Image (cartoon, rainbow, N blue to C red):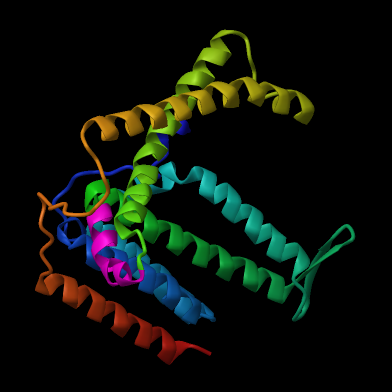
Amino acid sequence: MMEKMIFGRFIPGDSIVHRMDPRAKILFVFLFIAIVFIANNAITYAILLGFTLLSVFLSKIRLYFLINGLKPVFILMAFTFFLHLFFTEGGSLLFSVGFVDVYEEGLRQGIFISIRFLVLVFMTSILTLTTSPISITDGIEVLLGPFKRVKLPVHELALMMSISLRFIPTLMDETGKILKAQMARGSDIGSGPIKERVKAVVPLLIPLFVSAFKRAEDLATAMEVRGYRGGEGRTRYRQLNWRIMDTLSLLLLVGFAGLLWYFRS
């Protein structure tokens, strides 16, 4: 599972989404996060899900690859669904499981919240899968540029976000290697009582933290040796180009928000 995680990974390609300006994609995702909360009935959530699947199709990222890489997220989504199913009251009583009553509103909220969670994860994953960490850094830095007037360290914030995204798959790969090494030594995390599983995780976490701190120290040393002093006076090798396609994508998102508002209860 660690090897199939897609958080922070970048897949080069030549799709419409790949060719979009990173600033447009970042704005698109942030606006989409706000627009998601407009949906409040079956029609709007169906439109929301269809729009998300269309975005996946345009990115040319295989849906199977996306679903397979987000298995841990689906576990969290299932937990959220059952939490709403068993603890949200309202509407008519559907059935009872022991001392727990399942109501119509609980089923409705469980489905809607799960769909909302799913589309948000899909959209943010498309952003990272179709945009290189360097492009994300440049896009965030340009978008936050006006805040430089209030002495906000925009360049440093963008760099930290980029490094965090870049090291997620690296740490996942490192976790997989450590896990295999522990299993070769007879450690078994996947079976036994909860107490024993927690004890077995400790030998996994300690070398992972040591490796993470060592990588951070090596990166800091490399940046210092190369004369890194922040964003002051730095130029960019890659220039961002805002095109008509980027403007049309944001206008499409505005139209999509209007469509959701029209069908909203």
User: Is residue 189 among the parts visible in the rendering?
Assistant: no
Extreme residue in the top direction: 185
Q: Quadrant of residue 32?
A: bottom left
> What residue is rendered at 35% in x and 27% in y?
218
Q: Residue 38's spot in the image, x, y percent?
A: 48, 81
Q: Is residue 149 left or right of residue 104?
A: left
Q: Residue 94's spot in the image, x, y percent?
A: 76, 71
Q: Is residue 91 above or below residue 238?
A: below
Of 25 and 109, nearer the camera is 25
Extreme residue in the right direction: 99
Q: Residue 168's spot in the image, x, y percent?
A: 41, 39
> What residue is rendered at 19% in x and 55% in y?
18
Q: How many marks?
A: 0
Magenta-highlighted stretch: main secondary structure?
A: helix
Q: Is residue 109 above or below residue 181?
A: below
Residue 143 is one of the magenta-drawn residues: yes
Q: Is residue 79 left or right of residue 230?
A: right
Q: Residue 75's spot in the image, x, y percent?
A: 58, 47
Of 43 and 9, nearer the camera is 9
Q: Is residue 157 left or right of residue 186?
A: left
Q: Is residue 4 above or below residue 88?
A: above
> What residue is rendered at 71% in x and 64% in y?
85
Q: Is residue 6 above or below residue 83?
A: above
Q: Quadrant of residue 165?
A: top left
> What residue is rendered at 67% in x and 21% in y?
200
Q: Quadrant of residue 198?
A: top right
User: Is residue 174 among the parts visible in the rendering?
Assistant: yes
Magenta range is 136-150
